[in-house]
Image (cartoon, coloured by chain):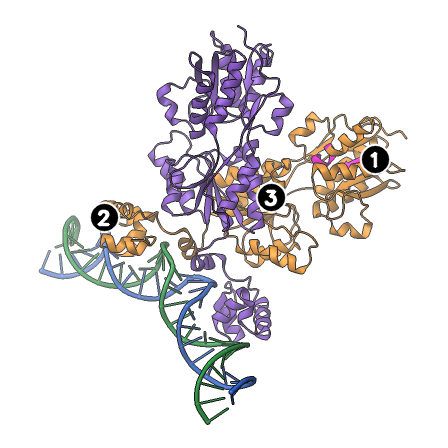
Chain colours: A orange, B purple, C blue, D green
Amino acid sequence: MPDRPTLKTVAAAAGVSTAQVSYAFNRPDRLSAASRAHILEVARQHDYAGPDATARSLRTGRVGAVGVIFTVGLSYAFSDPYTLAMLAGLTEVTERYCAGLVLIPFDVGGTGDGDAVHESLDAVRRALIDGAVADGLADDHPAVQALARRRLPLVMSSASASARSVLIDDEEAGRQVGRHLRGLGHRDVAAVVASRGEPGTLVHEVDEAELFPYSRLRLTGLRDGLGPGARVRVVSAGRNSEASGRVAGGSVLDAPDRPTAIAADSDVLAAAVLREARHRGLRPGVDVSVTGFDDVPAAADAGLTTVRQPIREKGRLMGRMLLDPTFEESRVILPTELVVRSSTGPAHD
Amino acid sequence: MPDRPTLKTVAAAAGVSTAQVSYAFNRPDRLSAASRAHILEVARQHDYAGPDATARSLRTGRVGAVGVIFTVGLSYAFSDPYTLAMLAGLTEVTERYCAGLVLIPFDVGGTGDGDAVHESLDAVRRALIDGAVADGLADDHPAVQALARRRLPLVMSSASASARSVLIDDEEAGRQVGRHLRGLGHRDVAAVVASRGEPGTLVHEVDEAELFPYSRLRLTGLRDGLGPGARVRVVSAGRNSEASGRVAGGSVLDAPDRPTAIAADSDVLAAAVLREARHRGLRPGVDVSVTGFDDVPAAADAGLTTVRQPIREKGRLMGRMLLDPTFEESRVILPTELVVRSSTGPAHD
DNA sequence: CCCGCCCTGTTAATTGATTAACGCGACCCT
DNA sequence: AGGGTCGCGTTAATCAATTAACAGGGCGGG
């Protein structure tokens, strides 16, 4: 018996039909206890590990796992506190449902041209999942569209025409930051946002459509909150990492017309900006004001003024949308809250 | 056409055999460019997302994903620096191979009796993977055995009779710690190890067999390194977390016969012990010596004497063992290095 | 005594693809 | 003209299970 045993093998060895073996593993109530015991015993003797997962999935149409799309390198994602908090919430739920979690890389390295996109979509197309979470992606993202074509249940964290979503009101959050800064007298603000551009480069108005959807909304809110007459320059931070944040922050701080405040799109970026500021002898909240986003644990330590969002709860709700059949809402909006700490203060130039 | 389209649908609509459609998606060289273009066009019109992932997996026997078994809650794992570093290395490789990563919960909550084990094994049995990584688990762990029965390629991080492995020499690492402490004059040491027991309780010699395999080996090495005549008490830390570490550390520090040194099984536990020590007014490296394990980034900040192991490289190698067909070795032993910092110092009682 | 139901068990259709083997013209070479 | 090869397609077996529908024996009730 060199071959891997199958249901058929076991059925033949036990002298019953394959249906009986299947029932023995899946529906104890459909056969007598005696024959179930016998079948399981024969299975053990043949070292049969139970029904093949792939075949069962094909037949039942269920896989028992949900996916998460990652548009940045996975090995980087594991160092991002926002992502980790979201995943922690998500896995609380998947675990309760005994579901696996599939991390799907969508890594369009380099130019991002048609072929590269096509290639990296393979992982999305081949992923064995019952549904997926696309955090921070827009409806028109190729990975999202590929999933939609597969007709898989999808949960997003930005407003979507078709998919269910768990959101925050990004525009309002941006407005909270804008109003706070305006109240402190800031009229010249740099927004540091993750984007495809090189860290430290300016994002022109026409390119703002290319930003992540949440960045666009926060920008709109920020401008609104600052009111008319304020200047808002948008600076690309490349990816959302410490290193990129330092480059972007440095370029803003070294500009001849340095803004009085810097609103970063995440606490990770904001913390990097803070470090660069201190490095230049600038006192946060005095010489320059800095705000973040998310309120990850490190923000409190850094004295960072930031917008708190319930990240873990977001993950939990996304998970429930996918797995809990009694969860009906197709859109949940979570509250945000401006947390004022020492990194912001009155403007003076 | 309310149903999800299949290969057959598309073949019929395009007026070709299903084989052609399959080739159009998988083997462009097996058909003329014209008919390939035609088929893909028809597929698009019918909103066909490409061959069904499950069916393809059944037929080809390949899934395109590898699994990682977690014996602690996933949402907790995301806060453990060792796990994150290992995953970062692992995903570097899976990403290169466009493979998904499936996080498989094996969460035997509560008593851990037969039924609960059986139940939580379901996720392991049903996981759609081509192979798996079992970090820190022993050959006789139920989840490992379930995977072995499925005849899936398996990579472990402890010595295994059957599976391939990427290891460190845990016994030698323990010995390094032991010798270091002996050199400082410590003759009474507490080893704080993760285990199933309640944090803070003593682990009796007979129960040591129940510990994680790496803990056992390190203990053996530690005793050997300390040499004859030294006392080593083993204290359970429950799970490998800050909270558990504080409980375990507190109980050791409050014991009437407090040891002069505490060797923790991870930097996370050691950092917790350090905090408890400081909290009691004990100066690390002076009033009490503490060692960790892993050398995660936080260890340097905490001034922790610890054993460095190349965690990320471990993850990378595990991934290559699973995915890189040119990687032949079935056992790799990585080097460790004792990093002496300020948390250890001469013993005096 | 007969009808119908329950309990166990079997038959066989189905899930959606992959791919080896083979068929059939057209073309080339000698 | 005969035979070999090449390009392009089709046929049909196979992957390993699930499950609706059905069959027959035993048994209780009328």
Q: Chain of mark 3?
A: A
Which of the two residues, A300 or A13, is positioned nearer the viewer here?
A: A13
Disc 2 element: helix
Indicate the quadrant where residue A241 lies: top right
Q: Chain of mark 1?
A: A
Q: Residue at x 55, y 17 (%)?
A: B290
Which of the two residues, B104 or C11, is positioned nearer the viewer here?
A: B104
What residue does disc 1 label? A253
Disc on the earlier residue, 3 or 1: 3
Disc 1 element: helix
Q: Position of residue A231 (x, y in %)?
A: 86, 41
Residue count near mark 1 (Cα–Cα under 10 Å), binned few <14, some 14–19, many ≥20: many
Please report contact status of discs 2 and 3: CB closer than 8 Å, yes or no: no
Residue count near mark 3 (Cα–Cα under 10 Å), binned few <14, some 14–19, many ≥20: many
Q: Amino acid at mark 3?
A: Leu
Q: CA distance from mark 3 to mark 1?
A: 31 Å
Q: Amino acid at mark 2?
A: Ser
Residues indicated by labels 2 and 3 sit on the same polypeptide chain: yes
Q: CA distance from mark 1 to mark 2?
A: 77 Å
Disc 3 element: helix
Q: Position of residue B45 (x, y in %)?
A: 59, 68
